[in-house]
Image: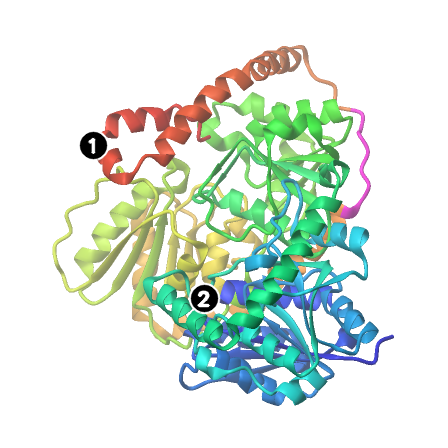
Amino acid sequence: MSKMKCDVIIPVYNAPDWTKLCVYALIKNTPIEYINKIYLMNDNSNQQTFNTLHNLKDKYGDCIEIITNEENLGFVKNCNKALKLSTAETALLLNSDCLVSKNTIPKLIRHMEKDSKIGLICPVASNAANLTYPIFEGFSYSEMDALLERKFSGKTFDACTIVGNCLMISKSCLDTVGLLDEIYGTGYGEETDYQFKAMEKGFHAKVAIDTYVFHKAEASFGVSKAKEERIKKNRDIFFGRWGAQYNQLAKEYAKNDPIKYIDNNLTNDDRKINVDSLIYLPVIVQNAGGCHVVVDLVNYLSINNISANILYDENIDYAEAMLFNPISVDKINDLNCKQMITTIWNSTFKAKWYADKKHVPLISFVQGYEVYFENGNEYGSVLLSYKLADYIFTISSYLHDKMKTIFDIDSTVIQNGVNYDVLFNKNNQNSAKRITMFMRGNPMKGDYLLLDLLYILNSKYTDIVINLVYINHKIVFPNLEENGNKINLIKGPISRMAMSEIMNNTDIYVDTSVNEGFGLLALEALCAGAVPIVSNSFGVNEYIKNGENGILINEVNDVNKYYEKISVLMSDNELFMNLKKSHHETAIQFDYDLVVDKICDYFSEEKAVQEKIKLSEYETDLLNDITKKLMIQPSNSLFKRFAFSIAKKTPQGLKNKMKKVVGALYNMYDHS
């Protein structure tokens, strides 16, 4: 066992969702004996980030120390503040949007133990300037790490410019060279400046090509003109100091480039897609809640070093974290997998086709009572899709019981979860004034009731805030007279962090859906400190106890019932506060970090193809008909993709002039 320990320094400025993932990956992938302290350096971030950091501290305990700056110091000063506190044999500077892989820290430490002259060392990353090595299609970032470790274990290269997103510095180097130069302000170039100072003192700066991390980049600061100007200024400072030395080193580096070395020494077999769990998600798109659940699932499996990926037909501007490179259906014949997972009933038939070709079991991931979808128009087809699966897992006991009672089909329950660390806050608001509703563009979600409610609330009150998020851009809202209320009509789709921020500033969340397999939005609202007033739509009973932590409306189509309960809460502060008392107890039970452990266990099990339920003559004919349609899909799909890509890439100004044409192209694409 190594005697060397590491202080991990994570400078934080907003981006709480990435900070949460960063810490989660660090804890999951680092043996505890290697960690001395994790310093979360809060550089005067927003309230939501402050809450997240303290939730992480509560979860992980004494290994985490939060240092909060009362004013924004900027990246370099913030790092130096932590480096002064570091007492361990090594310190790791880790960006909050950088996720370590299994044993990243032990591997970097072992390189330092082998060569005491190494003062600085960094891994290869998915996004890291001259040390960028993109994630292969069909791989996760953790699989990239496993590949590099298998091929290049123990191998390092001299760095031309060390990269600071995940940078280990030895204590002896830190003591000799000192701190980062604060002339570089909010960052860029400071780590390379430090590298050249260290090399002048006799230390080596290395790249470990057996270690790979995920780095998103720009999570805190984004890209702006101000940043471009800062980069230029810092480059001028750096080259004014080290230009000659850098140019000489760059010539040597070009002869021995670690990225070229990796690329030249990986074979086609190394790049071949071998995935244990292949999840068929026809469309990866921002405005679909079920899509987010699937991507989250694969992200967390990736962090936990479990092989899984998504097979897709279309990837439409998905804006959230993806720690893997999903697979186009074009690659289906060239990959290996151990099991196929289908994500919605109408994807089951094609997934079944793929599973049969690969001779692997088919698992159906059921997120809603799908026989009710489309007003029951596809009832028989949905039931057939359930019968085709070898295994089924669902997100709620409601779905399990419904399928068992009606169809005698069994399933495994793995309940949905929330991003507790980002969402939970103590929310001491002692009266209700802020109401949030979400129109999801689906008749089953009761959008028409929310429009009624918007109109009624605006006419009855004069000093409230109403947030109405809507997806359907064609909707015509009622003419609302100015009545002293603040009405925020928020056009979606919006990012999950934007939705989280809205929830954190909500007192009452209203949901009028008539059918929810689980109802994740209401649980997220509860976790964020809002009192949910929701229709008694089945799945919400997993976590809402009527009159204890929320209010259930049995008369789901009666808008007056929702209004009555809102009025009671807004006039009875004691009731409002009482309903929030058990929110923490409820939320912590559905923390996704706990849920994912069950998911990891489920996906790690070896599953076999089972003997199928016998189909009726009608179902056999239906299956044959659907299969025939699938067989002619590729040529049809190719035309749709071509049309859709034109529509998607057309500049907005031209779109406005060509609405009918672009709209027609867009509508050729099947969004179901």
Q: Quadrant of the N terminus?
A: bottom right
Residue matched to label 1: 657
In the depicted view, which residue is nearer to us: 521 or 585?
521
Q: Position of residue 620 (x, y in %)?
A: 66, 13
Report which quarter residue 605 is drawn in: top right
Residue matched to label 2: 220
Chief secondary structure of the magenta span?
Answer: loop
Residue type at tag 2 = Ser
- 190 on left or right of 301: left
Seen at 48% across and 31% down, the residue is 373
Disc nearer the start of the sequence (2/1): 2
Q: Position of residue 266 (x, y in %)?
A: 74, 44
Against 139, residue 10 (above or below) is below
Instruction: Work out whether residue 38 can be spotted.
Output: yes
Q: Are marks 2 and 1 in contact (CB under 8 Å)?
A: no
Q: CA distance from mark 2 to mark 1?
A: 36 Å
Quick one: SS at disc 1? helix
Q: Position of residue 119 (x, y in %)?
A: 70, 77
What is the span of residues highlighted in magenta in the rendered image?
Answer: 604-611
In the depicted view, which residue is nearer to us: 103 or 561?
103
Seen at 61% across and 60% down, the residue is 251
